[in-house]
Amino acid sequence: MKQQHLQLVFTVLLAVAITGCQNVPSSGPAALAGQWTNSLGTVWTIHADGTFHVASTNPKAEIWGTYTLSGDTITVQETRRAGPVPKSCRGPGVYKFSRQDANTLGFVLVSDGCKPRIQNVMQPWHRQ
């Protein structure tokens, strides 16, 4: 009886240890897919198929686009926007991304000429 109890305790501890060791994806679409929000009130929905949708309040905008990944680097490109596209936002933006934990996403600017996009992307992002 004592041995069965000990086996049960060991099994539970092993399951907890394995669960605690699971890593957050750090590359590929799985690392980014989901709905994210930042302190400016922007909601960025990133789909695993390489598309995204942004609803921003500061500045007010609704944007659709595509992205490509190479390791921890994301290149974003607007394909459609509600309203006029600022001239500086017609090209791609390139950022390095990192995941501190399952609910946090951060970016570092590599190159981008679009100031409103830089302002939003560079904020800390939290999973909704």
Image (tube, rainbow, N blue to C red):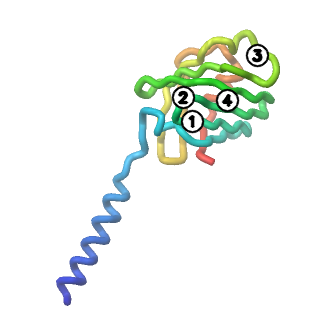
Q: Which residue is mark 4?
A: 120
Q: Can you tell which of label 4 and label 2 is closer to the viewer?
A: 2
Instruction: Indicate which disc, 4 or 1, sits on the residue closer to the N terminus.
Output: 1
Please give the name of the residue rendered at 62% of the width and 29% of the height, measured from the top-left corner: 121
Q: In 3D space, how far apart are the residues under numbered discs 4 and 1 (Cα atoms)?
A: 18 Å
Q: Which residue is mark 3?
A: 85
Secondary element type, mark 1: loop
- The image quarter in which residue 82 lies: top right
Which amino acid type is shown beneath numbered disc 1? His
Q: Give the vertical position of 124 relative to 109 (above or below).
A: below
Q: Which mark is residue 47?
A: 1
Query: Badges 4 and 3: C-beta atoms under 8 Å apart?
Result: no
The spot of residue 23 in percent (x, y) is 38, 47
Q: Which residue is mark 2?
A: 50
The spot of residue 90 in percent (x, y) is 68, 12
Q: Residues within 10 Å of mark 4 (few under 14, many from 20)?
A: many
Secondary element type, mark 4: helix
Which amino acid type is shown beneath numbered disc 2? Gly
119 horizontally vs 61: left or right:
left
